[in-house]
Image (tube, grey):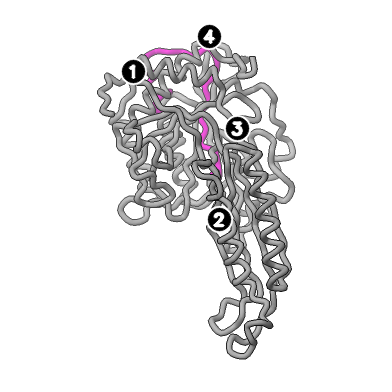
Amino acid sequence: MSVELNATINAERLNRHIEELAQIGRIGETGVCRLALSKEDRAGVEQVKCWMEEAGMSARIDPFGNLIGVFRGKHPELPVLMLGSHVDSQPYGGRYDGAIGVLGAIEAVQTMAEKGFTPEMDIEVVAFCDEEGCRFNKGLFGVRGMTGKLEEGELDRTDKNGVTRREALLEFGCDPAEFEGYTFQAGRIGAFLELHIEQGPVLESLDSPIGIVTGISGPLWWTVELNGFAGHAGSVPMPMRRDALVGAAKVIVALNDLARLEDGASTVGTVGSLSVFPDSRNIIPEKVTFTVDLRDIVLSRRNEREQQLLEAIQDICDEHDLQYLIREDTNSEPRYCAEWMKNILRKEASGMGMKLPELMSGPFHDSLTMSYVTDYSMIFVRCKDGISHNPKEYSSPEDIALGTELLYRSAVRIASGTEIGRRSDE
């Protein structure tokens, strides 16, 4: 689909911001590494803060590491319209994941200011802290902090170097002691709209530059530990071994098989991190720790696969005389986008001469947590070959501009005050 648009936003400025932010934490020619609460993350946040202020917003960093820009409306007592995403990245990531949602939101607000548009309510643009979750093995930290949904022990989580999240926050310039005085005000956020690359191949297969999201799959994250017994690789007979790595391998295959049980289903299962102790070529592995990521847009099916995986782990451990421990790191149900917000996206896309495909999101986003406190919707932007979490991640400036134009037009419609507050259950 080729679309020519007389855009309202400044696409050249937006693309320049994307390119400039990508130089912070740059790896190779196209990759970035801005781990949450790192020096690179802080530098990225400071740069984005400057752009927020240039766009006419006041900006601050809250105790959870979230960068919040506020564009004042006529009635600040009204529930706010919130736009945004995140600027932290994977350790071997691309320049578009999260970043276009923040920079596109800034561009939308800056266009409003330049056009002389004053919203009915305040508009807040947020760069949420640690959406990715790769450093401390639990994501959506900033948005969960902002909405009062942090769990016990979160500040004691450590990265691979033994640095706790509490220490990282302090180094970042935030004070975790301020958490105690923070309470989320229910109803403060009227709606949340997020622009993001698709991170999958659907839009490209449909030859569509952008699409409307219908909902987000519910992620289940485990950390699994299997314990056997170490022994000499040359002297312990195979029938007498308690090899934790063999057990882990069988669990990984079982997860893969379970995720493929139903043709055409949205079920996906992944083991993305694994560590072996004592990690020597001539010692039988005694302990293996690995992650499990299981997702589905249909909760009942995900629950069924979870139970089947638990049974497989038990059977495998019985077979190999292993002990196991499972820690549940994340468990979220699928969350669906608000119909009234999707209707706005449909209408504004039609005004741009486009009829957009609608698709679900397998990856989670900050919108997942926001869905528990307000109505939300998302715009996806096509990415080449569906590649993400990789330096080869790519979305064209033209596609990003189209997504940002739709974000701008939809935000103006919502911020005019005629639509916000129409809850999806009405």
For marks 4 and 2, give the CA distance.
Answer: 49 Å
Say which residue label 2 marks. 257
Neighbours of disc 3 within 10 Å: few (<14), some (14-19), many (20+): many
Q: Secondary structure at mark 4?
A: loop
Residue 335: image tag: 3
Instruction: Decide whether residue 120 is among the magenta residues.
Output: yes
Q: Nearer the viewer, mark 1 or mark 2?
A: 2
Q: Nearer the viewer, mark 2 or mark 3?
A: 2
Q: Are marks 4 and 2 in contact (CB under 8 Å)?
A: no
Q: Give me the residue at 54% from left, 17% from top.
A: 340
For marks 1 and 4, give the CA distance.
Answer: 20 Å
Is 333 drawn above or below residue 91 in the view shown? above
Which of the two labelled residues, at mark 1 and mark 2, occupies the earlier sequence position? 2
Q: Nearer the viewer, mark 3 or mark 1?
A: 3
Q: Secondary structure at mark 2?
A: helix
Expressed as whole percent of the image width and height from the top left, the position of residue 146 reads 63, 35
Neighbours of disc 1 within 10 Å: few (<14), some (14-19), many (20+): some
Q: Are marks 1 and 4 in contact (CB under 8 Å)?
A: no
Q: Give me the residue at 69% from left, 56% from top.
A: 310
Where are the magenta residues, as a range?
106-131
Say which residue label 1 marks. 352
Say which residue label 4 marks. 418
* Res 59 seen here: no
Which of the two labelled residues, at mark 4 and mark 2, occupies the earlier sequence position? 2
- What type is the residue that disc 2 sits on? Asp
